[in-house]
Amino acid sequence: MISTTPPGAPYHRLARTGRQRWWRPVVGVLALLGGALLVGCALFGVAAVVAGITDTPTDADGLPVFGPVVDTALLVLSVAVALPLTMAVTRWVERRPAGGLSSVLGRVRWRWLGTCLLTAAPAITVMLVGTQLILLATGDEMTLVGPLDAWVGWPAFAAGLLMIVALVPFQAAAEEYLFRGWLLQAFGTWLRSPWPGMVVQAVLFAAAHGWGTAWGFADLVVMGLLCGWLAVRTGGLEAAVALHVVNNVSAFGLAAAFGGLTVDETMADAPWQLVLVDVLVLLAYTWLVARAADRRALATVAPGAGSPDRPGSGSPGRPGDGSPGGPSGEPGADGGPAHPGGRSACPVGVG
């Protein structure tokens, strides 16, 4: 039996259903780790078989080398599998609707996601251009795009771009659903405040990218914190997913254009110039999205028990629950009022 979403619950408390027990998140972690290991072994096992049949060369670690596009696709897929795994664990281990990972309405609010994508695109552009200008101003030899004579040509770029557009959004979304979604809500089953879960998921998110520089690690922690805050503040993952998708597609796209797909550096290896600009852009994006959420009066808590036919209506935040207040008024397409009737209470390189 699948439990329903608790009425009036903020985003980080959606996993606290009638069937929730203290041990379910623990079993969920084990299931996620075990599932990721099995799927990863199967994915690279198939790659090894294909490599053996096609006599593909291997690297120093004995892994097959198919080429930049295919090798990157395998790496991206190995992360993207976390998306269906997270949803499966939510439904079968926690016995609750997987849609609760998307938002308090139990689904993706597509129009709101589109708004966030349109906000993230110029923000990431400013981050890339601003970082390059500061690198040049400080005399740093590092560049974000590489020398122009490293252009790979249109056929190679088109192949890389096709792979990126097809797979990278799922890889970025998988990280958000795992860290800002499932993990944040797992802590919400034990604790009323969202902040402990926000901090832990942000640190684990940064650690998952490896250790490069202290600056890079700090930048990933900041991104994790702000995306976690946005998830609770807006009642869903759309804002965080939009930012992560635009960031990763842009980073992979530049790498595909200038022969950087084989480079294994991530945001964890970022220099201070990139981190400086990125943190400012992240803060600006967070502020803009919060303002847009206010204007739309997005639902930030699950629908009340007395109005199942009104999925957008929220309920006021509860004191001491760590939840922002919800909107009032007639529901609109994204869970907010169709007319100005209320506002919610109070006010991200490859990641």
Image: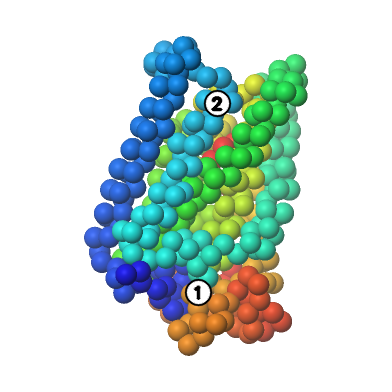
- Badge 1 amino acid: Val
**What residue is pinned by disc 2?**
70
Q: Quadrant of residue 273?
A: top right
Q: Under tag 2, what secondary structure?
A: helix
Q: Is residue 30 left or right of residue 278?
A: left
The mark nearer the N terminus, 2 or 1, is 2
Distance between the Cα atoms at labels 2 and 1?
42 Å
Q: Which residue is mark 1?
A: 301
Q: How is the image coloured?
A: rainbow
Query: Which quadrant would residue 293 be assigned to in this image?
Result: bottom right
What residue sits 64% from the left and 45% below the top? Answer: 246
User: Pointer 2: residues within 10 angstroms few (<14), some, or many (20+)?
Assistant: some
Crowd around label 1: few <14 · some 14–19 · many ≥20 (10 Å): many
Kindly state the secondary structure of the residue where label 1 is placed: loop
Which label lies toward us, 2 or 1? 2
Q: Is residue 5 left or right of residue 341?
A: left
Which mark, by number, is residue 5?
none
Which quadrant, please, contains the N terminus? bottom left
The x, y position of residue 43, in whole percent, is 41, 32
Q: Position of residue 109 (x, y in %)?
A: 60, 64
- Does residue 240 appear anywhere in the picture? yes
What residue is rendered at 56% in x and 19% in y?
67
Q: Is residue 289 left or right of residue 78?
A: right
Query: Observer-nearest residue: 13 or 138?
Result: 13
Residue 271 in the image, given as x and y percentages of width and height:
57, 31
In which quarter of the view is residue 198 placed? bottom left
Depth check, front residue: 130 or 98: 98
Which quadrant: the C terminus? top right
Residue 346 picture location, percent across and down: 57, 72
Q: Please say if the residues under marks 2 and 1 sit with CB atoms less than 8 Å apart.
A: no
Residue visible at 37% across and 33% down in the picture = 42
Residue type at mark 2: give it.
Val
